[in-house]
Amino acid sequence: MSHYVPPKQGKLSQLFDVIVLVALTVGALFVPLWLNMAGDAKEVTTPVENPTWESLGQNAVQAGQYEALGYTPETAHDLILARFDYSFTTGALITMIVVIVAYYFLMLKFSEAEYREVISEKFGQK
């Protein structure tokens, strides 16, 4: 039985693969930020007039930590009270489910083709 030798990939193909992977990584990390789809909460739903640590729901230890970071009750007001919006639409949920299921079946199909290719290279056609 002969020793399996995988096919060689050229230097230009490797460079192209690296560029594509870097572009996809940067895109996955920064595009949501550029489109304002990620990041911190945008607004305070119920602002507090003349905030104190107590009115913001902070105990002495929490207040001490905020003060150690340079915050006052006025500057920490938005940071503490802003909440994320966890709402979603049914259409967005269905679209995400379809994309994930389609990706799963696509990977199964590609994996099957590559698996059969490796088996045929290793053991020959039957």
Image: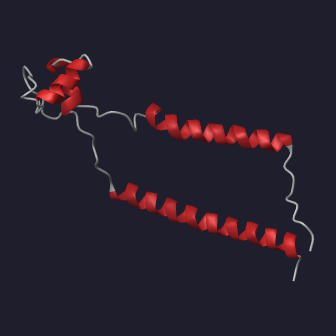
Q: Tell me: 98 left or right of 91.
A: right
Split into 4 quadrants, where in the image is the C terminus?
bottom right
Residue sitting at x 9%, y 22%: 51
Image-quadrant location for residue 63? top left
Residue sitting at x 81%, y 44%: 13
Q: Which is more toward the observer, 43 or 112?
A: 112
Split into 4 quadrants, where in the image is the N terminus?
bottom right
Q: Tell me: 76 left or right of 57.
A: right
Q: Tell me: 33 left or right of 22.
A: left
Residue sitting at x 27%, y 43%: 85
Picture coordinates of residue 10, whole percent (x, y): 86, 45
Picture coordinates of residue 19, whole percent (x, y): 70, 37
The answer to whether 28 is drawn above or below residue 3 in the figure is above
* Colouring rule applied to residues: secondary structure
The answer to whether 33 is drawn above or below residue 68 in the figure is below
Q: Residue furthest bottom?
A: 126
Image-quadrant location for residue 41? top left
